[in-house]
């Protein structure tokens, strides 16, 4: 038996006026999704009540790790995904390149991903920022190192004795789009006697504002503006975290596996659990990601390398929702149906292997707010044995519409940490 997990990041949503009150999933024709929903379906709470909704808490839960117990912050998972080990007294941060504009209301953030900056532009901007004398001096004084990538996502590691990180508010940039940044710069939520935490807060704030002065007129950003792209002109550290440990996936479920994704967060959750994280050329976390390459790599792990389990994570629906684009979110979901789930079902069926496939969104990402939501998500599990039995009996393969409204009366799995147990048919 082979087992597959497909996560369409942020696919779930709420009813939209533009779609006649339907959600994106409800409005689309998704034949492969509906094949999965014909077997087993339900709703799952992937984000524990009281915790901030996000892919960190949700995907931890999906892989069987209770974030109420293990979670220290998002960035350490991304650091692990990039092979970065925190030093003693190390605190990690996700460092976004964002797009801000100087307006009559002060600096306003337009994009959490710097207008989707990537490749040589992202690397050049970050490397030049780090090399800037004033910024480099402040980084050294703050004890900060930034690990540069070729995307808008970078990792910061600060050596600091700060222990009261809960007192420091580092706002997620995707939650404050089109807002003045002044109220969302790092600040203390409560009074604290932790002098190091107070210094960390002040240092990060100063580095953010200094980065804008360095990057606002950078040649890369002038070129981006000339061709109509948003500038990537400010760093935005967030998700501060200390070291995190996760239980072995293989020990917990007696399954060996691989996780195919394009984002460090998912690599980190997988690698900390002992799962393999193969990289796929052209997989970039955006709408034009290499869908076929991801499917090929998952099938290679299952059918040629002897893995029991493979996961395919697609970031695109979430990114399109954060960008506020209904059409691009719809297209991202169509592509997951046609270019990920459909080929997985067909090629695994052709292999002759019995298999089960779990399909879900990690969390809703709402187009109405362009932010994450913690509501339960629909999930479905395809079982090749069920389909084969139906066909053998002369019945058509079962199908059902995969969407929020169709599953609204299905039982709620209140603990998303039980999803792997359901996939593996383990009590």
Image: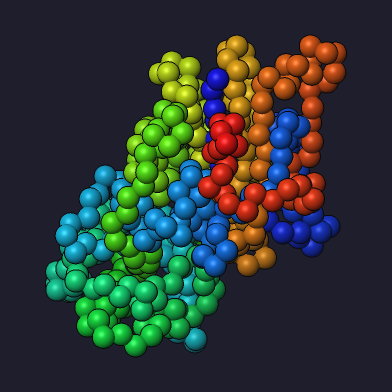
Residue at 21% over, 78% down? 196
Where's residue 166, x and y in %? 37, 74
User: Is 70 left, or right, of 204 in this rendering?
Assistant: right
User: Is 349 left, or right, of 220 in this rendering?
Assistant: right
Residue in the foreground of this view, choosing between 400 and 72: 72
Image quadrant where one finds the C terminus = top right
Image quadrant where one finds the N terminus = top right
Where's residue 263, x and y in %? 42, 46
Where's residue 303, x and y in %? 48, 17
Residue at 41% over, 65% down? 98
Q: How is the image coloured?
A: rainbow
User: Considering only vertical position in the picture, is 112 above or below 280?
Assistant: below
User: Considering only vertical position in the picture, is 134 above or below 85?
Assistant: below
Q: Is residue 199 visible?
A: no
Where's residue 53, x and y in %? 54, 61
**Quarter assignment of residue 249:** top left
Residue at 72% over, 22% down? 386
Q: Is residue 34 visible?
A: yes
User: Considering only vertical position in the picture, is 107 above or below 309?
Assistant: below
Residue reaching furthest to the front: 427
Q: How many marks?
A: 0
Residue at 48% over, 77% down? 108
User: Is 125 left, or right, of 51 in this rendering?
Assistant: left
User: Considering only vertical position in the picture, is 236 above or below 351?
Assistant: below
Residue in the foreground of this view, choosing between 152 and 220: 152
Residue in the foreground of this view, choosing between 364 and 43: 43
């Amino acid at each position: 038996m082979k087992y597959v997990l497909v996560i369409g990041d942020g696919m779930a949503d709420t009813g939209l006026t533009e779609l006649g009150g339907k959600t994106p999933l409800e409005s689309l024709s998704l034949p492969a999704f509906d094949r999965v929903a014909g077997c087993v379906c339900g709703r799952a709470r992937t984000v524990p009540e009281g915790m901030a909704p996000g892919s960190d808490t949700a995907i931890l839960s999906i892989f069987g790790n209770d974030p109420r117990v293990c979670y220290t912050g998002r960035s350490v998972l991304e650091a692990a995904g990039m092979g970065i080990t925190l030093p003693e007294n190390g605190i990690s941060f996700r460092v976004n390149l964002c797009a801000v504009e100087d307006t009559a209301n002060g600096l306003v953030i337009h994009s959490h991903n710097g207008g989707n900056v990537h490749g040589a532009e992202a690397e050049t901007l970050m490397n030049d920022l780090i090399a800037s004398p004033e910024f480099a001096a402040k980084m050294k004084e703050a004890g900060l190192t930034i690990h540069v990538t070729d995307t808008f996502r970078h990792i910061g590691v600060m050596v600091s004795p700060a222990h009261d990180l809960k007192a420091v508010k580092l706002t997620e940039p995707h939650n404050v789009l089109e807002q003045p940044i002044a109220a969302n710069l790092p600040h203390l939520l409560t009074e604290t006697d932790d002098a190091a935490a107070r210094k960390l807060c002040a240092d990060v704030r100063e580095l953010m504002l200094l980065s804008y002065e360095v990057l606002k007129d950078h040649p890369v950003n002038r070129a981006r503006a000339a061709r109509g792209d948003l500038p990537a002109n400010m760093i935005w550290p967030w998700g501060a975290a200390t070291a995190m440990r996760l239980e072995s996936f293989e020990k917990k479920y007696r399954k060996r596996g691989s996780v195919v994704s394009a984002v460090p967060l998912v690599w980190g959750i997988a690698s900390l659990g002992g799962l393999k994280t193969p990289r796929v050329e052209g997989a970039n976390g955006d709408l034009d990601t290499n869908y076929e390459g991801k499917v090929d790599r998952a099938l290679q792990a299952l059918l040629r390398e002897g893995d029991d389990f493979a996961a395919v994570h697609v970031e695109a629906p979430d990114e399109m929702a954060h960008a506020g684009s209904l059409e691009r979110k719809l297209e991202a979901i169509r592509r997951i149906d046609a270019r990920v789930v459909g080929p997985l079902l067909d090629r695994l069926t052709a292999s002759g292997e019995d298999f089960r496939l779990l399909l879900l969104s990690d969390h809703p990402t709402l187009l109405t707010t362009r932010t994450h939501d913690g509501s339960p998500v629909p999930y479905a599990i395809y079982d090749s044995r069920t389909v084969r039995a139906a066909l053998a009996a002369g019945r058509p393969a079962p199908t059902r519409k995969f969407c929020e409204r169709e599953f609204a009366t299905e039982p709620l799995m209140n603990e998303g940490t039980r999803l792997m147990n359901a996939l593996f048919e383990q009590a």
